[in-house]
């Protein structure tokens, strides 16, 4: 009889699995994603990135600049507090792509604005890279 | 986590105590005790083999369904609870300075919603099998108690149904069953 009660107890312990209540939606406002990301190159190893923010009243604190290519995974290459950034590389990377996301005061990052690095150089001096 | 284990402990303790009280109370009647331990076995003890087969079959099917649906339900609840833990952790992570993509938060929320819906579906199936199992169990007990009142405590005395015949140099042994 004790064995039967023990087995019943084990079965009932399994059957009494409890579930957490469904939580309310977190009060998080996503920052607006950057738009019109443009990548220009005046030097084979330098890239000028510029973008815009559609909502000037948003709580964007900074922008995170990402880069990846055919041979590398996405990684942050820098942080900008304004709507431009100068990215430098040590060698020419095939299939280089840049992404920019806005980060709000709540530390929430927006979706990425993406643009590929140009194949051709623009003659002249970079307005962004020193 | 402590609350979940506490609920489990209370739930299992209450039911085990109830079963533990119920079994000795009915222990004076052997057929009832048999049906408490294994649905259909009391009816078999009373000689009602067809009813015994029906109750045992129903108990096995509903019991197996209950066990499998409970396992599936537990799996979906564990997945939901894991996602719930990640989701409710976001505010403190964000406050501590960790930057999190909004799409990741949204994806976790959507996955959590899907896991909740899945667990709700599985809970419904679990409850269906639970109801079927409990109904089988209760009807089995009611039936064996009523049958005992009708037939008395002693099991039906079967006429001798085993015999043998000599057929030339062969011996034929036979056993008859009554349903």
Image: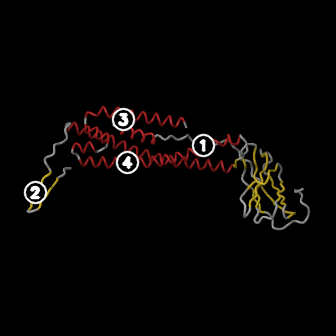
Label 1 marks a residue whose chain is B
Q: How is the image coloured?
A: secondary structure
Residue B106 vs residue B175: left or right? Answer: right
Other-residue count near label 1 (Cα within 10 Å), few / some / many at <14 / 14–19 / ≥20: few
**Which mark is first along the chain, 4 or 2?**
4
**Which mark is first along the chain, 4 or 1?**
4
Q: Is B103 in front, or is B32?
A: B32
Instruction: Name the front one of labels 1 and 2.
Output: 2
Q: What element carries label 2?
A: strand
Q: Residue farthest to the right?
A: A124
What's the mark number on residue B62?
4
Circle 2/circle 4 CB separation < 8 Å? no
Label 4 marks a residue whose chain is B
C-alpha distance separating marks 3 and 1: 35 Å
**Which mark is first along the chain, 1 or 3?**
3
Residue denoted by label 1: B85
Q: What element carries label 3?
A: helix
Q: Is B41 in front, or is B140?
A: B41
């Amino acid at each position: 009889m004790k064995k039967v009660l023990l087995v019943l107890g084990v079965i009932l312990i399994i059957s009494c699995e409890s579930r957490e209540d469904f939580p309310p939606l977190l009060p998080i406002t996503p920052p607006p994603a950057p738009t019109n990301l443009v990548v220009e190159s005046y030097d084979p190893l330098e890239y000028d990135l510029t973008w815009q923010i559609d909502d000037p009243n948003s709580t964007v604190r900074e922008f995170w600049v990402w880069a990846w290519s055919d041979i590398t995974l996405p990684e942050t290459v820098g942080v900008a507090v304004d709507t431009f950034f100068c990215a430098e590389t040590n060698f020419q990377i095939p299939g280089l792509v840049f992404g920019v996301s806005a980060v709000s005061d709540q530390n929430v990052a927006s979706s990425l604005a993406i643009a590929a690095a140009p194949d051709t150089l623009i003659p002249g001096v970079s307005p962004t890279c020193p | 986590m402590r609350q979940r284990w506490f609920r489990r402990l209370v739930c299992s303790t209450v039911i085990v105590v109830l079963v533990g009280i119920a079994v000795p109370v009915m222990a004076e009647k052997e057929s009832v005790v048999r049906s408490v331990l294994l649905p259909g076995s009391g009816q078999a003890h009373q000689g009602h083999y067809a009813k015994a087969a029906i109750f045992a079959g129903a108990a096995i099917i509903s019991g197996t369904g209950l066990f499998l649906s409970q396992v599936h339900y537990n799996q979906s609840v564990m997945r939901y609870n894991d996602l719930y833990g990640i989701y409710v952790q976001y505010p403190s992570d964000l406050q501590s300075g960790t930057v999190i993509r909004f799409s990741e938060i949204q994806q976790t929320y959507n996955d959590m919603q899907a896991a909740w819906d899945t667990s709700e579906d599985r809970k419904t199936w679990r409850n269906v099998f639970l109801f079927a199992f409990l109904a089988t169990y209760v009807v089995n007990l009611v039936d064996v108690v009523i049958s005992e009142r009708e037939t008395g405590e002693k099991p039906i005395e079967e006429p001798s149904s085993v015999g043998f015949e000599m057929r030339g140099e062969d011996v034929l042994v036979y056993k008859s069953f009554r349903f």
